[in-house]
Image (cartoon, coloured by chain):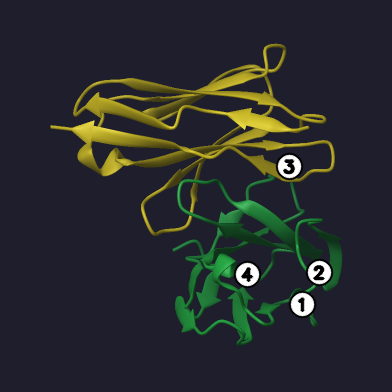
Chain colours: A green, B yellow
Amino acid sequence: DTGVSQDPRHKITKRGQNVTFRCDPISEHNRLYWYRQTLGQGPEFLTYFQNEAQLEKSRLLSDRFSAERPKGSFSTLEIQRTEQGDSAMYLCASRTLAGDSDTQYFGPGTRLTVL
Amino acid sequence: GQNIDQPTEMTATEGAIVQINCTYQTSGFNGLFWYQQHAGEAPTFLSYNVLDGLEEKGRFSSFLSRSKGYSYLLLKELQMKDSASYLCAVVDSNYQLIWGAGTKLIIKP
C-alpha cells in the first residue's frame, strides 16, 4: 500500500455512459498524475496537476476526458460517452516536490470495462 | 520522437541472475526509473538513477550510462515472486515520465 487510493477498483459500464473515477493522493504530495494502461503496454500519460492547477494534458486525450483537482487534494477523472476503446486500467500517481525525489507512487488503479 | 526500448519477455530460473536492458532516446534526461508491476496491479517503485553507475539495493541493482542512453536492472537470487513486468521510465526535459512497454519476466522452478 503506497498511500494512494483510487475508487472504484473496478467499473463495468455500457458504451455511451459517463463514468467518474476518484484518486486520493498521499496527503503532502503536490503533484498528481493520471495514466491509462492497456495490457502489455506501459502507462500512457493523460494529465497532471500541481496542487489544484492542471498543468498539462496529453494531446492524445479526447474532449470526452476531463479531470479536476478542485482543492489540491483528491482528483476526479471523468469520461463522457464511453467507447469500447476506453477499456483500460486508469492509474493515479502522486509525488512530492520537496527534496530531490521524482518518485511517483501509484494507486491500485481503476479497471474500466466498456461493453 | 521519444522512445524507450526493452525486451518484451524474458525467462529465467529460480535462484539465478537476470539482467533486463533498457535503451532510450528522449528529449532531455532527468533520471531513469525502474518499476515492478505484477499482473493486474499498479507499478511499484524499484530504483532511480540520475548519475552514471550502479545503484545496489538488496537483490536488485540498477545501472545507468547516460552517454549510451542505456540502463539495466539486475535481479539476483531470483524468487518465484519476482515474476512480474519490469517497466523502464525516463524523466524527460519537461520532467514528464516516458514509459517503456515493460519486460515480462517469467521465473521457472
Q: Earlier in the sequence, mark 1 or mark 2?
A: 2
The part of the image, by quadrant, that contains residue B57 is: top left
Circle 3 residue: A100
Looking at the picture, do discs 2 and 3 lie on one chain?
yes
- Crowding near the residue tagged with mark 4, few <14, some 14–19, many ≥20 C-alpha atoms within 10 Å: many
Query: Residue B70 in the image: x percent, y percent?
Result: 61, 18
Query: Residue A92 in the image: x percent, y percent?
Result: 61, 64
Mark sitting on residue A69: 1
The part of the image, by quadrant, that contains residue A68 is: bottom right
Q: Disc 2 marks which amino acid?
A: Asn
**B14 left or right, relative to B83:** left
Whether label 4 touches label 2, CB < 8 Å: no
Circle 4 residue: A25
What is the chain letter for disc 3? A
Circle 2 residue: A51
The kind of secondary structure element at disc 4 is loop
What is the chain letter for disc 4? A
Looking at the picture, do discs 1 and 2 lie on one chain?
yes
Q: Disc 3 marks which amino acid?
A: Asp
> How far is the residue under mark 1 from the one under mark 2?
8 Å
Query: Residue A102 in the image: x percent, y percent?
Result: 69, 45
- Crowding near the residue tagged with mark 1, few <14, some 14–19, many ≥20 C-alpha atoms within 10 Å: many
